[in-house]
Amino acid sequence: MHRERIRHPGLQSKVTTALEASRHIRDGMTVGMSGFTRAGEAKAVPLALAARAKEEPLKITLITGASLGNDLDKTLAEAHVLARRLPFQSDPALRKLINEGEVMFVDQHLSETVELLRTRQIGPVDVAVVEAVAITENGGIVPTTSVGNSASFAILADKVIVEINLQQPDALEGLHDIYIPKRRPYREPIPVVTPESRVGIPYIDIPPEKIVAIVVTEKLDSSSTILPPDDETRAIASHLSDFLLNEVKQGRLTNTLQPLQAGIGSIANAVLHGFIETPFHDLTMYSEVLQDSTFDLFDAGKLNFASGSSITLSKECYHRVLPRLNDYKSRLILRPQEVSNHPEIIRRLGIIAINTALEVDIYGNINSTHVSGTHMMNGIGGSGDFARNAYLSVFVTKSIAKNGVISSVVPFASHVDHTEHDVDIIVTETGLADLRGLAPRERARVIIDNCAHASYRDALNDYYDRAARRGGQTPHVIEEALSWHARLREKGSMLP
């Protein structure tokens, strides 16, 4: 069957085992692998690398689009294959080694990685490993459920290994829109003017002689761990819906809104799912990851079109959507992440961006990556690409965590990924803070009154009142600014 998927006759002889293919990767190399939020990752060659590492010295720099599925980051981390990892991850085992200092993790905006590679500020990529559904007659690589950085890895690498995955439906062919910006200073505007714009070709165009090995696989993508909406996420969705309805009433939006983006995760997914119960209609998406909510909105007749860089679904949704991919195909595009996350396109299209925060402070600064300011969780991902350039930059979070011992609203964010300048709206289950046009002192009252949990509100107001008496454009009691995090470390709770 794989011969039908490898349509270039000169490449049939390149089929080999994952172990033999992996021997093109040697100690000290930089490897670019496909994969974006558990979708479309190479699945066999990474395991072969982990096996080899038990027998020989093997450390690599691994660059992907985003996180990998099938526990591959875990397997590579535990085999001590990874010397350096970028630009995103979400695996607990790898996270542990990052926080211990064994793996050097470079946390990057997802739109920037290939720009740095293309201009040789990082890299170069020695070998690219790309999962594909097919190879065309002219040697073009047809990606599977994600594009991510795969196209640029294949273009920039000296050697390319292709994994043909027979379990990925051949209906994926034609879904992708591969557009590579020209090198600066000769770059032209990227001609994406609507989410529906097709501006590239449906495969990765490289000289076929760069393909040094083809591995046949049959492993499915990992399913996402999306949780169903709960009372808190439904409340967040309701607050955001009411806000957007008022924007329509004020004439700033219509009931078709602007193109939507949502970050990965249960809260953002639940918020998008909440649009099903609203009067909004004929919606579009211009996002990175197309989650369960994308297809729920399609099936509810609310969504007309969705552009992304990967399709990452729960187990139930995966088995519901993939066999019916032809039903959705005319309404979907998967793009390289430097296009899906391109700041100029985001600003031109007027995206409503919805991303998740770990914590927010009383002035609207957002921490989306570091627990207590020091320990990496996953990475900034694409949230910064969207937050800085969106028509509306929305951050959502539950007001408390760990059964109430942690407040998500704090006096001072312990790590800042998105400054107050890039944040328009903050929403928790307790309410919504519209920060547009407000000075820091005004922001503080709105955030505390609307977004903080009742058990922490008095303490936040007390902190702000004492800080304000000291003066300043952005008042703080400097010696107490991180005292809540210190109390959590020492006593296990932020509660006063």
Image (tube, grey):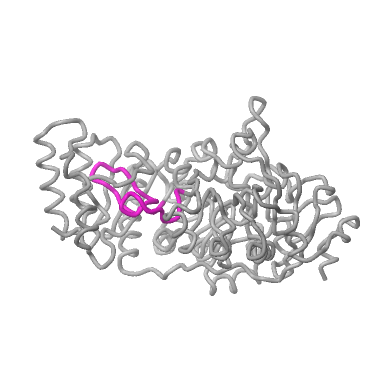
Of residue 148 and residue 235, the one placed in the foreground of this image is 148
Does 430 sit left or right of 253 as displayed?
Answer: left
- On screen, 40 above or below 28? below
Task: State the image coordinates of residue 324 (x, y, percent, origin top left).
Answer: 65, 69
Residue reaching furthest to the front: 56
> Which residue does the image show at 57% across and 42% down from the upper left?
113
- On screen, 235 above or below 413? below
> Which residue does the image show at 34% across and 54% down from the upper left?
371
Magenta stretch, residue numbers: 355-380
Residue 379 shown in magenta: yes
Task: State the image coordinates of residue 374 (x, y, percent, origin top left).
Answer: 35, 50
Of residue 474 and residue 15, the one placed in the foreground of this image is 15
Does 203 sit left or right of 93 as displayed?
Answer: right
Does 215 sit left or right of 332 as displayed?
Answer: right
> Which residue does the image show at 26% across and 46% down from the upper left?
361
> Which residue does the image show at 43% across and 38% down from the upper left?
388
